[in-house]
Image: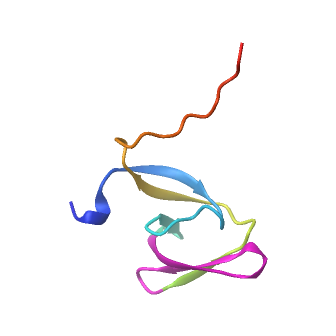
Amino acid sequence: MTPGENGVLVSVEVDAGTVRRGDQIMLGGQVFTVLDMAAMRGGARRLQFASGESLIMLRTTVLWAARRVDPRLRRRRLPGPTA
């Protein structure tokens, strides 16, 4: 494994505020890996893919992405209901 490939691949729902570098997004049956991002007016974000293409994600755009996460990292637990 190369340094950027650690962890397991999970499916996550992303929008312009939650998309990250390295996310793999499938559009039209082709996988695009997010290389860089730029904030735009109105909460939109311009995604630059490793292949050279770009996509403008509006604030309301919702997509599914594959993201690598390290299962060994502890996640912060949210407070549960109290009795």
Q: Residue at x 65, y 64 (%)?
A: 17
Q: Position of residue 63 (x, y in %)?
A: 61, 61
Q: Position of residue 5 (x, y in %)?
A: 30, 60
Quadrant into which the N terminus falls = bottom left
Quadrant into which the C terminus falls = top right
* Relative side of 5 to 52, left or right: left
Q: Position of residue 24 (x, y in %)?
A: 45, 65
* Relative side of 82 to 66, left or right: right
Which image quarter: residue 33?
bottom left
Which image quarter: residue 82?
top right
* Relative side of 61 to 75, left or right: right
Q: Position of residue 39 (x, y in %)?
A: 65, 79
Q: Residue at x 36, y 48 (%)?
A: 70
Q: Which residue in the rendered view is the most extreme toward the left?
A: 1
Q: Residue at x 71, y 75 (%)?
A: 44
Is residue 10 covered in magenta? no
The range drawn in magenta is 31-52
